[in-house]
Image (tube, rainbow, N blue to C red):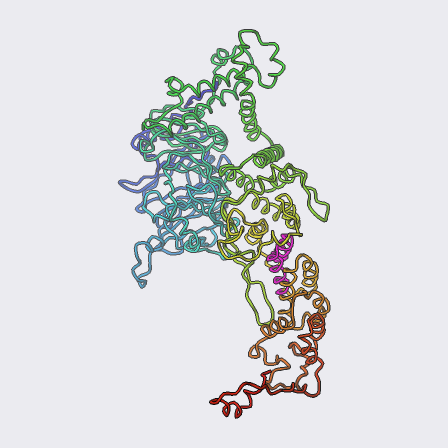
Amino acid sequence: MARFVLEQTSDFLDYNGGANLAEVLTQRSSDLSDVRVSPEGRHIHVILRTPTAGLVTFDKYQRPHLALSQKKQDLCLTRTVPILDLLYLTQNSTDSAVLAVIYDNGKAEFWRFRESKPGWHLLQTSDLCNSPRAKVVSVCACANSIIWCEERPPSESSPVLSSSRNKLRYCVCRRDFEVEEGGVVLRGVKIALHNNPKFTVISSGDYVYLLPDLKTKPLVIINKVILGWSPRRDTFRLSTTCKSTPIKEDTLSTKESDFKRLLADCLGFLSVLDSPEICSYSSTGCGGLALLLSSGWACFLQKEGILRQVYKLDYNLHTFGPHTSLCMYQETLALLTDQSLHLIDVNCGTERGTIKIKNAGLLFRNPNEKSMPQFVSEEGIYVVTETKDVNSKLKSSGSSKVESIQPGALLIEAVFEEACKYYQQRSLSSTRLTVDALKKGGRFQAPISLATILRTYLRTGWRHREEQNGILNGDEAVAGQDKLMSSLESELKALVALEEIKGRLVKGSVKEVEALCENLVETEVSRLLSSAEIDKDSLLYLNTIFKLFPCQAWRAVQATLQFHYNGEGLSSSSLHEIWKTVLSPAPTSPVSNHCTNGEYKHSLNANHITNSKLKVPSVPAVMPVFELLCHSVYLFEPSWLPSFLELSQQQQGSAGLALSLVSSSWGFPSGRGAESSDKNVPLYKRALSVVSSLSSDQEQSQDLEVELLLVSGRPNAILQALRILMGRQQWDRVTQVAKKFCKQSPLLNKEIFSTLLCEVAQHRELDPYLELLWSLCPEDITVTNILNMVLKNLPSPKSNSSLSFPLSTAATSSPAPFANSQSSQLTIGLLKPLLRKVLERETKSNQGYVDILQSPSYPPPTPPRQPVERPRTGTSESTESDNPVSTMVGS
């Protein structure tokens, strides 16, 4: 086994004034926040705050005899203005270093250290800020830029601001520099962010992080925000300490950005978050940030904005000192407290070791030894080294099989850690349960038994277990043990295989990791879709897979459902049980926001019906399986979506396009019919909800919606598709759809014909297709029905003054009954073939309408009226004879 030891590399005697350095650090042993160590460890600076502001520097020379023989100039400053921080601007060689001393008032002094000319030499003094009244609160160096956060006091003429607005009087600025032999060239000041609170700026690689100031009490919402800024790409990324993914990423369209604008659309979301506070932080040097949170979690914020929890500390953070030191060394996170140094593996989240220390220290990173943790304390500089304990290795195994048992040891340790979490959640005691207590207490037999089984399984060699079954002796091959091992073998193989996969993910190349992810995603998708019933946790897990690995998930779906696309349609040869899982009903109706009884809301125009712009709903966090597959199909093969819907309906037992009237869905009121239930939402509605939530191109979305509506085969959906096509004035497609679906049922035929007849009454776009439309006229329609529909749907004269019906008495510019050649009004001549066809089917009692259609030159004669003899009475005889109408039969 490996163990870690401390090795002292310096006792300060190799630094000039080493005795004074030890004394200064002893006085500040409780607080080393004002101590700065150069990257290579050759210079140690101590910023003095009280009783007077100043700076003391201690240097280590590579050639001490030259430094003693020559007069050297130490960097010891006494100033009236407090020193804010120190920045190392360049490390061109081991002989030279340039240091920037930044003051609170924005002044900057640039010093150069040379080995050949011992000591520090002042290059120049400059002003960082444009305003003389500005105050710098934090500063860092990123690449060839100095970045700082400054406070700009309000002008005397401006009104007094409120306390909340008064905290947003800071701005973040940058200034490019170039180090030359004779000095430092500073470029102009650029404001990157304004109207922001007091931020602590930290550089890591090519990124700069803006953290809320830990010493002040910022606003509640501001305290939850971490801003990641890329100066090279001019982008800001918003993250929090309670979410693993970034909230927002904003690209600056101008040279500066407003902090209030960045947070404007996130305030409601941030107000409900319960984010832990940041106790300590450190730059990783490669674009990330190491954080220690008040919740006890040590986290790693990657440059992409992903927050990864690394390790949960068992200790109470209040027992730590006020200045806990944190630093990243490649794959090891070092956490230095007042009593101990913790070494944590960031890959697997386990503690590699703990070293007890006497006094507090300050961690620093040496670029020449990136993997070795180093820290400075009042006794000297120490480095952590790793040694191999040969004796313990021989005792544990006695052979060369130590490496093969190491994965098993990690697996057994993971069993105990998981058991600790399980029992701690169900314990009524406030005492924290540890792995050692679980092993020694003897109260919990389940993890101990499982660990024993794992140990036996690994020792017998799980890879060659089938070959070893016949070789085991009688003591080892006990009947009960064999029965137990055979029943648990599949689970044990899965556990060990999982550990191997973890190792391959960590150690494998990029191509190996991609191939491994492909296989894992396909296995998991196939397992979940093949399950008899998918619960909420499994559905959430499946959604996570599709979100994190969309391409791999799409290929896994094709393999699991065995899709075959021949250019005309989609087919599948998968099992019916898989389709049962795919077509499981949605827990809530996904189309309730914009769909009613199968129809999208549309608006009426004076000339035609147009489909209104659909409101795009937000994609739900957890989608049902069918919606999830539609989402994947739409992203990678959108042309397959209608075929996928048709295939799904066939699997569900639907007859595709040839639905009968019994299975058709006509618009019932809410609460009636099978479709009113959320669990019986038709598949086409569920597919439409996915399209409307994803598509940003309305024209492309409508094309796909029409195909889905037609593939569904439901009358209401077909009518809605017809209205969308009429709204887009695609008359060829309208007539094709009408001709195809009028044969489906008499009721649908009547609805389609009535819809098209209403459209003909409004404009002349369908005139080339009138012969086809008249052939679709249903058998049970009458002339009265036709005329009523036409009259009800004629354009209003107010909307178009040129429109007038020939039989109307309104005055027109053209002699009635003839219409203007450019008019869109409907004439009797256009309706004549239809009316003639309908009248031929009517009975003799309606023969009068035929005479009207033939337009005679004189009205028909009045039918003869014959007097009727009625019995007379004495009182009414004279009255009835005087009234001629009463003596005639009314016509």
Frontmost residue, 101 versus 262:
262
Frontmost residue, 711 versus 792:
792
- Horizontally, is 325 left or right of 780 in the view? left
- Picture quadrant of residue 111: top left
Residue farthest along the top direction in this orientation: 474
How far across and down, in percent of the image, does residue 855 sit? 70, 83
Frontmost residue, 130 versus 5:
5
Q: Is residue 59 visible?
A: yes
Magenta segment boundaries in residue numbering: 700-727
How far across and down, in percent of the image, does residue 358 sit? 33, 24
Q: Residue at x 55, y 30 (%)?
A: 506
How far across and down, in percent of the image, does residue 581 sit? 57, 39
Q: Is residue 109 visible?
A: no
The vertical placement of 781 against 522, above or below, is below
Q: Residue at x 40, y 51 (%)?
A: 268
* Residue 708 is a magenta residue: yes
How far across and down, in percent of the image, does residue 438 sit? 39, 21
- Horizontally, is 781 left or right of 599 in the view? right
